[in-house]
Image: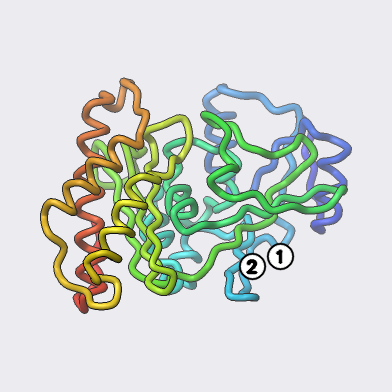
Amino acid sequence: MDFLRPATWADALDAKARRPDATPVAGGTDVMTEINMDLRRPTALLDLTRIDELAEWSEAGGRLRIGAGMPYSRIIRELGTRLPGLAMASRTVGSPQIRNRGTLGGNLGTASPAGDALPPLVASGADVEVASVRGSRMVPAGAFFTGVKRNALAEDELIAAVHVPPAAGPQQFAKVGSRNAMVIAVCSFALSLDLGHRTVGACVGSAAPTPRRAAEAERFLAAELADSGRWQDPAPLPEPVLRTFGDLVASAAAPIDDVRSTAAYRRHALAVLARRTLGWAWNEHCGGRRTCA
């Protein structure tokens, strides 16, 4: 196995162009686990840890740019108030040691349907910046995932950053697992309310081949809030609205039976998560404290 260790981003892109078979590694929390378990044997590793710009974030044009090498612990600490949904999801990733090493770009590159950081990015309307020696391009987060552990990267491309607008209203994330910590999601759900544009973002995780937007649920809730005047004059949501929203979220999923759960339970759990997170988010909008799972 060859080990490539570029010192600059330009060198990394050049290395990937010369060795498209090279597997990028930063935190290594997914790649090294698979190697240690003999699930894969890359012909080359492309170490990105020396490239400081990948672990930086900035703000321009009303959007945050988060480098692909940004670890979860820093997202929680430095961006928790700007991106509360992503921060909530980051807190559920592994152990403190994993959160210190694991990176946002690694979650994107692995493209697991159970990736905790992925539903908040889709629900928030994020874009993924990918680059190669040929140039860079932006891919909407919802289109970046093409199948189970498959993504839209060309063989010579690397993930550079994620571009996401700061929260313009309450955000929530919750997941169900077999225990309270260090667990792969049986299913997960992210919600983002944009009070300025009066739009709803909703995405299910670990219940379809890719993170999947619950578009019908989004349209229903946005229309219900507009028709009732609750966007501008918040009042408690009626129980039928919560239940319909939950049912529409569950219907957006395409779960399977596997060792962690049945498809039927995943649908049931998603309906519950959707109702609860909407209740927490709306309570915050009505002037209550932020609540999370």
Residue 53 shows which numbered tag? 1
Q: How is the image coloured?
A: rainbow
Q: Position of residue 13 (x, y in %)?
A: 82, 48
Q: Quadrant of residue 246?
A: top left
Tags 1 and 2 in contact by the CB under 8 Å rule? yes
Q: Amino acid at mark 2?
A: Glu
Determine the residue positioned at 69% across, 42% down.
24
Q: Is residue 145 left or right of residue 152?
A: left
Q: Is residue 70 left or right of residue 212?
A: right
Q: Position of residue 152 (x, y in %)?
A: 66, 38
Query: From the image, which quarter does the C terminus lie in?
Result: bottom left
The correct choice, above or below, for 287 with respect to 188 in the image is: below
Helix, strand or loop under label 1: helix
The correct choice, above or below, for 275 with respect to 208 in the image is: below
Q: Most extreme residue toward the front, as rendered?
A: 227
Residue 56 shows which numbered tag? 2
Q: Amino acid at mark 1?
A: Glu
